[in-house]
Image (cartoon, grey):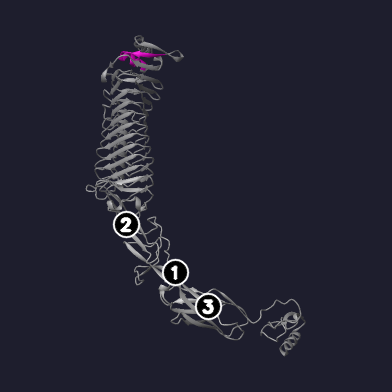
Amino acid sequence: MINTSRLTRFSAVAALTAATWTALPGNAFAANVTTYAALQAAFTNPASAGGVVTLDADVVQGGNADLSLAAGSSLVLDLSGHSLDTGSIKLGSGSKLTVTDSSVGAAGTLTALAASGDGAGISVDGATLLIEGRAVVHATARQSTAAGIGGDSRHPENGSVTLTGHAHVRAAGGQFGAGIGGGDHGAGGTVTINDHATVTAASTDGAGIGGGDYAAGGTIHITDSAHVTATSGAGAGIGGGYWGGDGGAVTIDGAATVHATSTGRGAGIGGGQAALTSPPTGGNGGTVAIGGSAGVVAEGSYIGAGIGGGGNGAGGSLTVTGHPIVVAKTTGYGAGIGGGYHGAGGHVLLDGGMVTAANREHYSHTSSAVGMGDGDTTFGSLAVNSPATLEIPEGAVLRVPAGIIVTGNGSLHDAPGGTVVNDGAIQLPTANVQWQLLGLLPHNYLVTFNANGGTPTTAVRVFATTFAEGARTVPADPTRAGWDFEGWNTKADGSGQSVHFTANTVISADETLYAQWGAATVTEAVPRGKAKPGQDLPVDVTVHALDAVAGIPHGTVTLYIDGKAVATATLDAHGRAVLTYPHVTRGEHVLRVVYTPSGREWGPSRSPEIRIQAGKPYPTQHGGHPGNGHPGTGGQGWHRPGHLASTGPTGLVEAAGLGLLSLLGGLASLRVGRRFRRR
């Protein structure tokens, strides 16, 4: 029997015997190779090459053979300024391949073109690929179900791919595989592009970068000064593949520049075409975050959004922070940012940056620059917070449906030529909204609070039907020296409709409200002489306006004694009247006069409280000595009926000259009472 494992090891050793060995720290060695056989041997047994293999010459094998990295192993491939042409490179499960170029002259180039069958250009299922330094890599899948870099038909899931340094990478997937990411039915895995890497990735139905056909985009992070161009037909430029691939999680920040395009049914960034089941499934935008000072252009066409859902897919979520410049547009039936054709809008939070969102007005009659795609009515949500600016360019329409509130304190600009159809509410500050250039209608109203002789006159523009929904504050009441503010009216002379304007008052058109004023008045009340019990007390009343322009007040005055109205009179032509307190009762009383105007020209007023004393005050008694003429005392023989009482065999009775007397029975009460009356 032939021992194949021994033959394999023998072949590897034989191939490496011709290689040049370079000492590495730790008694390891690096292999410098000039032949494809030596290179294959290093991939088969990286440890035998010290984990590093360097090209000392161009190695051209073409698509006639593959390189397979042993499972669980690690290998660094240094192009060192040379070219390597090979078939598919297959990374075993748990392995890691690093492709670099340490030369100082022209950078080396790795071309991986799958020969046939299931091969991806570089197959990374369950493995890790790092392309760094100045390496130039071209990876192409020849089989329709494989990715350029990532999954293949047998192992469609992508593992982890990092493109960094000054690497230049170009990856082309088969029809159903991603440029970089999953093969057919394979998710996008983890893709990181950073530093100064330049990447171009393309596919037909898979994503440019992300999921293969039917699959989601995975986790994609593009940062630093990386430059990325990603293109797909029915999948997303970056995100999900055709037929149900959701967008996954896409983060673009740093100073990265990204141009992501779907030329058919997917989003520029987000979902691929949804699966047309009943109802359609997948194709949603996923989670997209853009920050730093990145520059991003995302273009959908036909039925995909710029950023968001592919055809029939919902918008997912977009968050923009920092100071990026973002352009999201579609040339078809989708939203600029949001749903694809027949797709609901997503959740859009703009906390920074300049964001341009464009649908096609003439091509799509119900889609929105941000929100739903054509044929859907669910807007989602939109917040624009300072310092963010949302631009609506020429030919685009932002449609805010009834019941939707656009929140925030950021800016909404024309780019120019855009339009806003606002059937809901926009809370952005008026100064931050270019409403005239945008033709913002119908909910766009100017409410003018005309002080009508006072100050200030205030005009408030609101992009809603109430101040509450439009986040506007009702101005404080105006003021006018010598006058009292009495409310608002639709006519300056007060002949229109009185309006009690609040934050919830419904507005349906521009309107002007006029302050109504009543001349501030002063009411003076002067009693004639001293109040005497049992006698009438006349009170002279004068009412005058603080502002002489208002003339002499007309109306009535009412006299209140201890809070109870006792007399009313009409002012004469001089603003005077006499009121009478009839039959003054003994004791201390509070007198006040209230003026009630007969017209809106004057404001009501009331006199200060006046305390009057009729007769001598009642002292508080604590003993049985002579009194001073008040109820319950001696001295003047005054009697107040009802204050003599008995409560049984023992009680307390108020009696003249006796103070508080302890009584033994009803008879004693009678005697005391009679004695009091005789005096």
Where is mark 3, residue-wise? Answer: 525
Q: Position of residue 191 (x, y in %)?
A: 36, 31
Give how far across and how far down residue 451 sits, in percent. Answer: 38, 65
Q: Looking at this view, is 631 or 579 the one in front?
A: 579
Residue 278 in the image: above or below residue 587: above
For label 3, the SS is strand
Residue 404 visible: no
Of all residues, the one furthest to the left in this rendering is: 362
Residue 296 occupies which quadrant of the picture?
top left
- Residue sitting at the far front: 548
Mark 2 packing: few (<14 Cα in 10 Å), some, or many (20+)?
A: many
Q: How far is the residue under mark 3 from the one under mark 2?
A: 53 Å
Determine which residue is flagged by label 1.
482
At label 1, counting other C-alpha atoms closer than 10 Å, the crowd grade (few under 14, some 14-19, many 20 or more) is some
Q: Is residue 301 visible?
A: yes
Q: Residue at x 29, y 33 (%)?
A: 229
Q: Earlier in the sequence, mark 3 or mark 2?
A: 2
Q: Residues within 10 Å of mark 3 (few under 14, many from 20)?
A: many
